[in-house]
Image: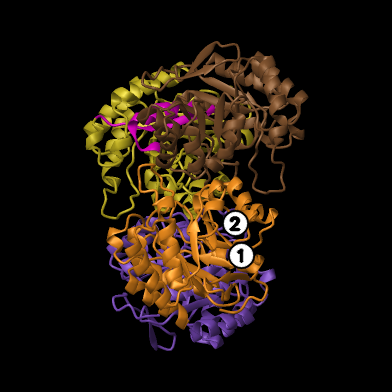
Chain colours: A orange, B brown, C yellow, D purple
Amino acid sequence: MTLNSKTRQIEIQNPDGSKFLIGAGDCTVIAGPCSVESKEIFLETAQTVKSSGASILRGGLHKLRTSPDAFQGLGRDAYRLAQEVKEELGLPFITEITDPRQVEELSDLADLFQVGSRNMYNYALLSELGKTSKPILLKRAFSATVDEWIGAARYIEKEGNSQIILCERGIRTFDRTLRNTLDLGAVAYLKAETDYPVFVDPSHACGRRDLVIPLAKAAQAVGADGIMIEAHPNPDEALSDGPQSLTLSQLKDLMQAILLS
Amino acid sequence: MTLNSKTRQIEIQNPDGSKFLIGAGDCTVIAGPCSVESKEIFLETAQTVKSSGASILRGGLHKLRTSPDAFQGLGRDAYRLAQEVKEELGLPFITEITDPRQVEELSDLADLFQVGSRNMYNYALLSELGKTSKPILLKRAFSATVDEWIGAARYIEKEGNSQIILCERGIRTFDRTLRNTLDLGAVAYLKAETDYPVFVDPSHACGRRDLVIPLAKAAQAVGADGIMIEAHPNPDEALSDGPQSLTLSQLKDLMQAILLS
Amino acid sequence: MTLNSKTRQIEIQNPDGSKFLIGAGDCTVIAGPCSVESKEIFLETAQTVKSSGASILRGGLHKLRTSPDAFQGLGRDAYRLAQEVKEELGLPFITEITDPRQVEELSDLADLFQVGSRNMYNYALLSELGKTSKPILLKRAFSATVDEWIGAARYIEKEGNSQIILCERGIRTFDRTLRNTLDLGAVAYLKAETDYPVFVDPSHACGRRDLVIPLAKAAQAVGADGIMIEAHPNPDEALSDGPQSLTLSQLKDLMQAILLS
Amino acid sequence: MTLNSKTRQIEIQNPDGSKFLIGAGDCTVIAGPCSVESKEIFLETAQTVKSSGASILRGGLHKLRTSPDAFQGLGRDAYRLAQEVKEELGLPFITEITDPRQVEELSDLADLFQVGSRNMYNYALLSELGKTSKPILLKRAFSATVDEWIGAARYIEKEGNSQIILCERGIRTFDRTLRNTLDLGAVAYLKAETDYPVFVDPSHACGRRDLVIPLAKAAQAVGADGIMIEAHPNPDEALSDGPQSLTLSQLKDLMQAILLS
């Protein structure tokens, strides 16, 4: 990837105080399970995230699901568990925030906040995040035009926080062969027209673990500043998003493919 | 319209204590300006809403706009003004709620709460509304499948509130000839398969005031339990949604067309 | 429906030489089976088409199906059969044309030519039809913008034939709850902005026979000049489009609803 | 790219009788102008196509345009000119066929036939092409599901011709930021689930020449068997598709990027 000199660089701090930059030319990988399910599973996943060379650990605590009866994440019960794993591995941690009232309670645990697709238009939440000093990974709503996505970013910026990473994760179209349609054209467009670092989440886009690696390579080739991946020690038993989660072995393969490009 | 005996009926209370039912066979009309802009404009509109035979007054206080720099509504500054107009006319009032922290402050003013399209997936907000005893008009997100829309309603119901009205307002498709594509097939489907009262908002769907009346008639013909209309004394000077707002004279024509069918 | 004085009127000739107009204010109904399957079934359907008050008989001879292994229609083998039924009932006949080389062979049988959704962009076919003197019912491609649809009509007009009826039959969107999304906003738009007579095909739009009548009523209410309906004596055994075909009893109910409005 | 051992290989013959394979592991590039406009322009473009290392020359003779008044290609008047350039450069030639009646007249000139997006559902044309012995590049309709696309290929195969290359060129979605949405997920899916060689046309997908190279690299990275590119010596004066045509200098850059990967 050519270094795009005008990309807005975002500094991420590791638990040990060392720092690295997003948007400086490398393809940064965020990986981890869809949801934090137990200490054992989260720790095992995080160990592979670390050893394979990924830079940021992800793990969902508050999940948004179409049905209120589906698994909604462990919520506050897992904050301590997540903190322990994060510290043990020495990786910065990102988790999704779903309510403006969670900002304070998550501020020790989360090094970056993720805004999920369903909340991209939740301007009350975005404004609240604009008052923090944490980097925000803002996923595109599955039906958002690029202009609306940039508009959402501006709700955060308007309150003073310009550390924003945009994350393409597939849009909703007439074709349901795969879970969503990954829009790499939007990534190319954003890299040409804006200074935001742009990430790609191929896992949610395709919904099938066997297609995650080729799409991740395509994302890197088009110029993405990073990718976000779901992985699980035993995806077929995951409580959410199992079909699209890589095995830990596949996560290592993915990291090899990304690091060698 | 044939009375669909299984539609869930929702009782609305007028300021004078009298009541009427939504979902009992008549086509209920909600009308008013997109935003409350001033007492004069709101009062003039409300008077025509009342005199033309519409049943519920609408008026936006907190507006969600793609850009943070666009007019965001008068917010709390207009609560008192809206209360005065509502009482003067004796009409129940509906307004959009955009943040779970607004529930309490709006509970005296709003007789019904409206959830806008951008917040249909805001489950924190929906759960908060499920704890109230007010009817909720739940607009379809412009990219929501019917199943996701019903899922959103169930987040409200799960907390104990089953007074839910679904409101179709146009979906986002490849064709941008009009602002959105009004999906009356979804209305027919919901009337056949669920017991929710279903309203239609033709104003947002088409974005052009000259097409609002034919689409309102179509909504009534397909079996909608009500329609929601934007009107303004001088639409070309409205601070939001002017192109799709009916003039007050057109609002009277619309009410004639609906009441005569 | 209000007579839209500027609608382009199209004269249809009955087999007995009498004539009637499309676009003159009434809602014209075209009905018949998806495919001509046998003389008995086609005749029985046609008798109800006639007795219930519909004006034009439809019946597919050349069918376009996603798979080449699906039933493709009886083709030329059924031309004589269709001719006999048409003459016996005294109804004008419309059938779909799928190849420019069919124009000549179908010119005795067909009183109107139908262009299906899959062929809306088949400009070679449209140009060939522009050289005939028959009315053309041009269905919207399920992904066509309104401008592209009008562009297709202009390919016909450019060769000299202005007897064009546009037919909305549902577009393809992210929501697959129903077979397609019926776009009645486009009908309202076309009635406001062009002089084409506009028909609506609710059968293909919804794909479910229980929703055809409410959508047909909505089409009439929005101002459509006519509707096109599939019906079959025994829909569950139809060789194509059974789920959306009305029974003959439902066809009578539909005609009552349309004629009484 | 890893050699996918099960990809159906297609033999292409150069004018000098030598041959090469599509689907054998290399990324094959087809390049040339959208339309053949004049001998000078076509020859100049073809020389760069050849010298830069692309394998197949493209050039439109019969163009399909939304309006019948737009430039429709030079048609038969340019057959001889195209033949001369093709022979002078020694490159196999591909051109779009738009009418089943063109098969015979184009059979000397065209080494491969291209079916454009608008004709993917034109089964009369596909069946006619199935009777030839030429490779067919079948573009996806901008609204076709993957299943419909495969169904279209099967119309060709049913008549005996299995030399089919599928070409993704962007689908139509709600987002019109770019001309179309390039669906590289569909490419990954087809490579995993079928044996068709799959090409990608980034030019039509994005509609902007500055985004063609990053999207071509992404196509190669996801595993495409080839790419199809529009180029022109002076794109701003091209009679069709100028904004998305590469300059000849950009075509050389693209070939460098592809050949070095």
Q: Nearer the viewer, residue B178 or B164?
A: B164
Residue A175: x and y, percent?
42, 54
Q: Is residue A4 visible?
A: yes
Q: Residue at x 39, y 53 (%)?
A: A176
Whether residue D163 is situated above or below residue B249 in the rendered picture: below
Q: Do discs 1 and 2 belong to a common subunit? A: yes
Which of the two discs, 1 and 2, labels the residue nearer the N terminus? 2
**Residue A190's mark?**
1
Q: Which residue is mark 2?
A: A146
Toward the viewer: C190 or C111? C190
Q: Residue at x 29, y 55 (%)?
A: C68
Magenta stretch bounds: C206-233
User: In the displayed structure, would residue C52 be above or below residue D11?
Assistant: above
Give the quadrant of residue B7: top left
Q: Residue at x 48, y 23 (%)?
A: B225
Residue D81, position as x, y percentages in the image: 56, 77
CA distance for labels 1 and 2? 8 Å
- Disc 1 marks a residue whose amino acid type is Leu
Q: Quadrant of residue C186?
A: top right
Residue C2 x/y as whole percent: 58, 22
Mark 1 residue element: helix
Amino acid type, label 2: Val
Q: Residues within 10 Å of mark 2 (few under 14, many from 20)?
A: some
CB atoms at circles 1 and 2 under 8 Å apart? yes
The chain letter for the residue carrying disc 1 is: A
In the image, residue B47 above or below residue D27: above
Residue B217 within the segment the image draws in magenta? no
Residue C205, above or below D252: above
